[in-house]
Image (cartoon, rainbow, N blue to C red):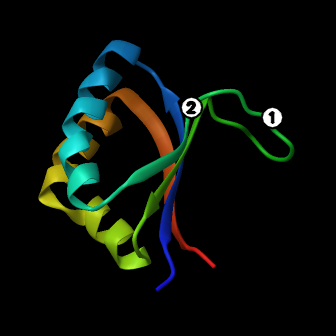
Amino acid sequence: MAKGYWIARVDVRDPERYKDYVAAAKPAFEKYGANFLARGGAYTALEGPARGRNVVIEFPSHQAAVDCYNSPEYQIAAKIRQEVADAEMIVVEGV
């Protein structure tokens, strides 16, 4: 079974409240087997507009990645994130 990956590009407007998002999202990530491959850090923009924070999260499957996002646990965190950051998020299937 192919793994699933969240790819998130985020501009954080309120770093202190973003910590609340991180804490609130943790139970969902644990429940769905998330493995962080990239979480912030240095980046080089090659084409198109960049965002300040880039995250890649590996899940056991594409469905687990989608289920994590749609879970009640993550949706609590998502509401916090949407108040304090601007983001694009997608799920892609691994090879």
Q: Tell me: 54 left or right of 91.
A: right
Q: Tell me: 48 left or right of 67.
A: right
Q: Looking at this view, is 38 or 19 the one in front?
A: 38
Q: Tell me: 13 left or right of 43.
A: left
Q: Name the residue under label 1.
A: 44
Q: Position of residue 42 (x, y in %)?
A: 70, 27
On screen, 95 above or below 11? below
Q: Name the residue under label 2.
A: 40
Local SS, label 1: loop
Q: Position of residue 23 (x, y in %)?
A: 23, 31
Q: In which quarter of the image is residue 16?
A: top left
Q: Which amino acid does label 1 sit on?
A: Thr
Q: Where is residue 47 in the image (x, y as percent from the top left)?
A: 85, 47
Q: Position of residue 61 (x, y in %)?
A: 41, 75
**At 24% across and 25% down in the image, what residue appears?**
20
Q: Looking at this view, is 27 or 86 the one in front?
A: 27
The residue at the far top in this view is: 16
**At 27% across and 45% down in the image, what residue appears?**
78
Quadrant containing the C terminus in the rendered view: bottom right
Q: Mark 2, residues whose alpha carbon is within 10 Å: few (<14), some, or many (≥20)?
A: few
Q: Mark 1, residues whose alpha carbon is within 10 Å: few (<14), some, or many (≥20)?
A: few
Q: Estimate the spatial distance between the alpha carbons at disc 2 and disc 1, rounded to whole Å.
A: 12 Å
Q: What residue type is labelled 2?
A: Gly
